[in-house]
Image (cartoon, rainbow, N blue to C red):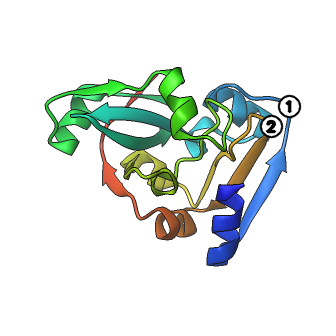
């Protein structure tokens, strides 16, 4: 898998875990027995024709208007599942890791994700997750940081 080989190549310390299938970020939090605010939920957006990976806590949803402002874009819309399958060929649809540049797109994370020392996200399948330090996540992803999440 692209994600694990990349983390290994960078010498990142991470934990991979396996669990019954989780089809949402909140479901992943339950399966992993951790609070939803520690789960990074990736949301793929097309902003003025460019794909952007956005990561926000499982307990939140994306505010597309705020995101468009952050990106200085005129239009931002969610990408549909058919496009996701072609963008992430090594992942199950809906289980993409929030590391956009592995797939040729920038990554933006919401500031609220940075409040914890650790972060967990799906590892390309609905049955696996990766947990690593927020410091390593930022080093690996080199994200832009914004404010585009709102409570569910």
Q: Which mark is residue 96?
A: none
Residue 120 x/y as whole percent: 65, 49
Q: CA distance from mark 1 to mark 2?
A: 6 Å
Element under disc 1: loop
Residue 84 x/y as whole percent: 52, 31
Q: Nearer the viewer, residue 30 or 7?
A: 7
Number of numbered discs present? 2
Left or right of 91 on screen, residue 101: left
Q: Quadrant of residue 133?
A: bottom right
Left or right of 52 on screen, residue 133: right
Judged from this view, the residue extending furthest toward the bottom is 11
Q: Is residue 132 above or below residue 61?
A: below
Do labels 1 and 2 touch, CB within 8 Å? yes
Residue occupying image coordinates x 54% and y 34%: 86
Q: Is residue 82 above or below residue 92?
A: above
Badge 2 density bin: few <14, some 14–19, many ≥20, Cα 10 Å:
some
Reading the image, the residue beneath label 1 is: 20
Q: Is residue 66 above or below residue 80?
A: below
Residue 6 x/y as whole percent: 63, 66
Left or right of 42 on screen, residue 66: left
Q: Which mark is residue 127?
A: 2
Residue 123 x/y as whole percent: 69, 47
Residue occupying image coordinates x 67% and y 78%: 11
Q: Locate the N terminus and report the quarter of the image it occupies.
A: bottom right
Q: Quadrant of residue 151?
A: top left
Element under disc 2: loop
Task: Identify the mark nearer the N-term, 1 or 2.
Answer: 1
Residue occupying image coordinates x 78% and y 55%: 16
């Amino acid at each position: 898998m692209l994600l694990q080989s990349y983390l290994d190549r960078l010498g990142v310390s991470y934990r991979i875990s396996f669990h019954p299938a989780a089809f949402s970020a909140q479901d992943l939090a339950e399966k992993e027995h951790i609070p939803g605010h520690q789960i990074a939920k990736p949301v793929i957006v097309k902003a003025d024709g460019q794909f952007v990976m956005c990561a926000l806590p499982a307990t939140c949803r994306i505010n597309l208007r705020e995101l468009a402002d952050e990106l200085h874009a005129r239009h931002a819309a969610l990408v549909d599942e058919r496009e996701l399958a072609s963008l992430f060929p090594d992942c199950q649809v809906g289980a993409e890791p929030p590391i956009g540049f592995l797939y040729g797109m920038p990554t933006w994370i919401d500031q609220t994700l940075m409040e914890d020392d650790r972060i967990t996200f799906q590892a390309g399948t609905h049955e696996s997750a990766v947990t690593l330090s927020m410091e390593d996540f930022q080093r690996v992803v080199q994200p832009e940081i914004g404010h585009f999440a709102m409570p569910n």
